[in-house]
Amino acid sequence: MNNSLKGALLSGVIFPGLGQVRSGYYKRGIALMFTVSASMVVIVIKAVQQAFIVLEKIELEGGVIDIKTVTDAATQAVSANDSLIYNLGLLLIVICWIIGIVDAYLIGRKKDLEGRLGAGV
């Protein structure tokens, strides 16, 4: 399997930035990994905060847990600001994922060409 395909698969299937790290472009790879990881952490923190808000609202309403109570509490707990944070986080992850795949492919392609030229093919 050639370097371009390996890099693209590592960054596309496993985790963004992994193809860059494997190809020796550590700063690029770590930057992509950090950005995606930080975005995921922010999304998880916001989701946990929303879950606690929903639980508090359910407790205040008598603690009866049924689907209508949970749905109503969740609807009231979500604000426009939280939706914006979720959407921006997801958008950042998708953009980094695409950049990671394309960049890893191009880096691998460059290495493939260098290998062919070095081998005299």
Image (tube, helix red, strand yellow):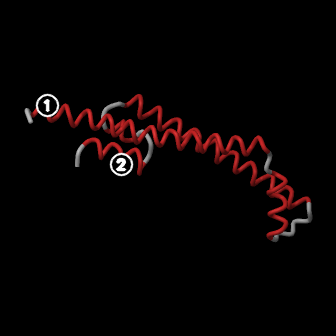
Q: Distance between the residues labelled 1 and 2?
A: 24 Å
Residue toward you, 43 or 12: 12
The image quarter in which residue 75 lies:
bottom right
Q: x, y percentage for residue 58?
A: 85, 61
Q: Is mark 2 on a helix, strand or loop?
A: helix
Q: Name the residue under label 2.
A: 9
Foreground mark, 1 or 2, reads: 1
**Position of 19 compared to 114: left or right?**
right
Q: x, y percentage for residue 19?
A: 36, 41
Residue density around tag 1, few if under 14, some if 14–19, many if 20 or more, within 10 Å: few
Q: How many marks?
A: 2
Residue drawn at point x = 33 percent, y = 36 percent: 106
Q: x, y percentage for residue 120?
A: 7, 32
Residue extending farthest right? 61
Q: What residue type is labelled 1?
A: Leu
**Position of 44 compared to 102: left or right?**
right
Tag of residue 75? none
Q: Which amino acid does label 2 sit on?
A: Leu
Residue drawn at point x = 85 percent, y = 66 percent: 69
Residue toward you, 49 or 79: 79
Q: Name the residue under label 1.
A: 117
Residue density around tag 2, few if under 14, some if 14–19, many if 20 or more, within 10 Å: some
